[in-house]
Image (cartoon, grey):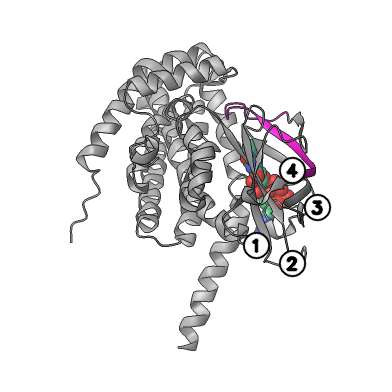
Amino acid sequence: MAVDLSPTPDVAELVERTTAFVRDVVIPLEERHGGVARTEDVRTELQRAAKDAGVFAPHVSHEYGGHGLDMRGRAAVFEAAGYSLFGPLALNIAAPDEGNMHLLEAIATDQQKERYLRPLATGEVRSCFAMTEPAPGAGSDPNALTTVAEREEGGWRINGHKWFITGADGAAYAICMARTSGTDAGKAGATMFLVDADNPGMRLVRHIDTLDESLYGGHLEVLFEDCRVPDDAVLGEVDEGFRYAQVRLGPARMTHCMRWLGIARRSQDIAVARAADREAFGSRLGELGMVQQMIADNEIDIAASRGLITQACWELDQGRSAAQSTAVAKTFCAEAIWRVVDRSLQICGSLGVSGDVLLSRFLREVRPFRIYDGPSETHRWSIARRVLRRHDTEVRR
Ligand SMILES: Cc1cc2nc3c(=O)[nH]c(=O)nc-3n(C[C@H](O)[C@H](O)[C@H](O)COP(=O)(O)OP(=O)(O)OC[C@H]3O[C@@H](n4cnc5c(N)ncnc54)[C@H](O)[C@@H]3O)c2cc1C
């Protein structure tokens, strides 16, 4: 049976417009800033231009001013936007805001949506997601969560230490994950809280110096010290935080893959242009077998990544948890995208390492993707466990 994977006409049209917008408006600005947006002026300029081009907020529902794309629609548009490091920021689909919008649409109350989702969806404010903690707290293992929220008259008091909280500097609020019951070793008992950034109990400690720089707002260490929040700051139900984290993380894993796939494609285009142009040993680089092999391997990694993203997105669109397919796609894409950027840089030789093309910036930006949203090893561990469980179930039948 033939399978039609082509996007709907609406999505195809949005992809075309996004591609033109990224090429004509976003890339010139990205190149002028070396791929790192450091000021609100740049963010505002990009988002205003995206609104004018009619490509802003493709993932948000119509009610909140977006295009209401499903996951498969997002896959095509996010890849087109991800062709530039500035594309996701322009379309308001960058991490962590994009994942937070998805979560808020799924579980926030109507009042919370008006107060937190609407201004986020329009780009008026930014947000952050505060889960990870320095050792011995939560990292790959969320059950090690040490941040605690205790009930008190009229609300909750949160105490805890977070780090690597992307975008915390300048965010209007954080979605903070805290333990509300259970023990450190137990699975139950985490709750998500909406904490306004002007809460005197939430303190930004420092910007962490990292390999990557392009995720807007940097990565911060954050303290919650006797941070008091009212009852209506609870996002969803008390003690259901780990379940909601899956609502956010499955799709967020895929949207990271989509955006970084755009950068892989851009890297390949830069490398192919160089290979077609540069001469060595009496021929063009592209006529040398080992260069051809790198170009072909890039093409294979890009195509395979896109295929796995499509499969996982299709499952998510069916309302399935897609735990296995998102883990498979995330692991493969994070490693394949790294390989593509690395090979592309190799093809460009010293030019690739220079700041004259953005390949060395891309390499720094994609490396941490093998760690966040679950390190490759953690995903392989959970993929294998699911396979073994399936085997055990089949044997018992
Ligand atoms: C650039 C960047 C941005 C981030 N942004 C955010 C954010 O906005 N909000 C947030 O809450 N967090 C954020 N994080 C944190 C990220 O989610 C964590 O880094 C990730 O969950 C891994 O946790 P950890 O760093 O504590 O690694 P650890 O848990 O200490 O793991 C270290 C290593 O142990 C190995 N390992 C782990 N589990 C297994 C296993 N089961 N089997 C075998 N080996 C294993 C892996 O090699 C892993 O890399 C960000 C991280 C980075 C790098």
Q: Residue furthest left?
A: 1
Identify residue for label 2: 182
Task: Pick whichever of labels 2 and 3 is earlier in the sequence.
Answer: 3
Please report whichever mark, 1 or 4, sits nearer to the chain's N-terminal start.
Answer: 4
Q: Is residue 214 above or below residue 228?
A: above
Disc 1 to disc 2: CB gap under 8 Å: yes
Q: Amino acid at mark 4?
A: Lys
- Does the numbered disc 1 mark a residue whose Cβ is under 8 Å from ligand 1? no
First in sequence: mark 3 vs mark 1: 3
In x, y percent, where is residue 35? 53, 20
The residue labelled by disc 3 is 136
Residue linked to disc 4 = 162
Ligand 1 within 8 A of label 4's CB?
Answer: yes
Residue 218's image quarter?
A: top right
Whether disc 3's CB lies below 8 Å from ligand 1 is answered no
Q: Quadrant of the C terminus?
A: bottom left
Looking at the rendering, in which quadrant would you find the N terminus? bottom left
Q: Which residues are magenta?
A: 209-227
Give the camera-side residue of 246 and 193. Answer: 193
Along the viewing direction, whichever of 387 and 311 lies nearer the viewer: 311
Q: Is residue 221 magenta?
A: yes
Q: Position of residue 168 (x, y in %)?
A: 66, 33
* Residue 165 placement (x, y as % from top left): 67, 38
Q: Secondary structure at mark 3?
A: loop
Question: Counting residues from the N terminus, which is met first, the one under dot 1 or under dot 2?
Answer: 2
Mark 4–mark 2 distance (CA, rounded to whole Å): 20 Å
Find the distance from the CA under tag 4 to the CA under tag 3. Answer: 11 Å
